[in-house]
Amino acid sequence: MIITRTPFRVTLGGGGTDLSSYYSKYGGFIFAAGIAKYMYIDVNQPFDGLVRVKYSRSETVKDVGVDRVEHEIARESLKLMGIKRGLEVVSIADIPAGTRLGFRIWI
C-alpha cells in the first residue's frame, strides 16, 4: 500500500501564465502558497485483480482494461504506467470538490 499526502495550494497571482503557449511569448509568473489542507491518494493491490478508482464516485473495471475507467486523470495515469489490472486508487481530500483550489504532485 502506498499513501501520499499533497498540500492544496492557493494561487495568488499569475494564473494561466504557466501555460507554454503563453509564457513562450510573454514570460510567466506564478505566485502560490500551500495551505494546511491536503489531498490523500491511496494505492493498493487488491486480491481479486480488478481495477478500482474511488473519488466522489466509485468505479470498478473488470478484465476489459482501464479504457473503461471514466475518471480521465486516473485512466490516463494507469495507461501511462502500463497498468491493466489489479490496482485500487482512492482519493480523499480535506476540502470538498469544486472549491477550485489546486494541488500539484511533484514526480
Image (cartoon, rainbow, N blue to C red):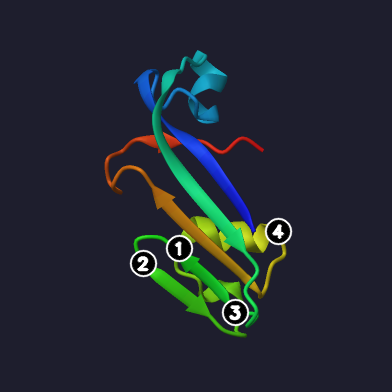
For label 4, the crowd category at 10 Å Cα-Cα, with few meaning under 14, some 14 to 19 and many 20 or more, is few
SS label for mark 4:
loop
The C terminus is located in which quarter? top right
Can you identify the residue that label 1 sits on? 71
Give, as a three-letter code, the residue at label 1: His
Give, as a three-letter code, the residue at label 4: Met
**Which tag, 2 or 1, sits closer to the chain's start?**
2
Q: Distance between the residues labelled 2 and 3?
A: 16 Å
Q: Where is residue 75 in the image (x, y as percent from the top left)?
A: 55, 63
Give, as a three-letter code, the residue at label 2: Arg
Q: Distance between the residues labelled 3 and 1?
A: 16 Å
**Which tag, 4 or 2, sits closer to the chain's start?**
2
- Please identify, in this view, whether the residue under mark 3 or under mark 1 is nearer the observer: 3
Q: Distance between the residues labelled 1 and 4?
A: 16 Å
Quadrant in the rendering for residue 66: bottom right
**Which tag, 3 or 1, sits closer to the chain's start?**
3
Q: Where is residue 15 in the image (x, y as percent from the top left)?
A: 38, 24
For label 1, the crowd category at 10 Å Cα-Cα, with few meaning under 14, some 14 to 19 and many 20 or more, is some
Q: Position of residue 32 (x, y in %)?
A: 42, 20
**Which tag, 1 or 4, sits closer to the chain's start?**
1
- Residue 81 — which label? 4
The N terminus is located in which quarter? bottom right
- Please identify, in this view, whether the residue under mark 2 or under mark 1 is nearer the observer: 2
**Residue at figure coordinates x 34%, y 35% from the top left:** 101
The reply to whether discs 2 and 1 touch (Cβ–Cβ < 8 Å) is yes
- Residue 57 — which label? 2
SS label for mark 3:
loop
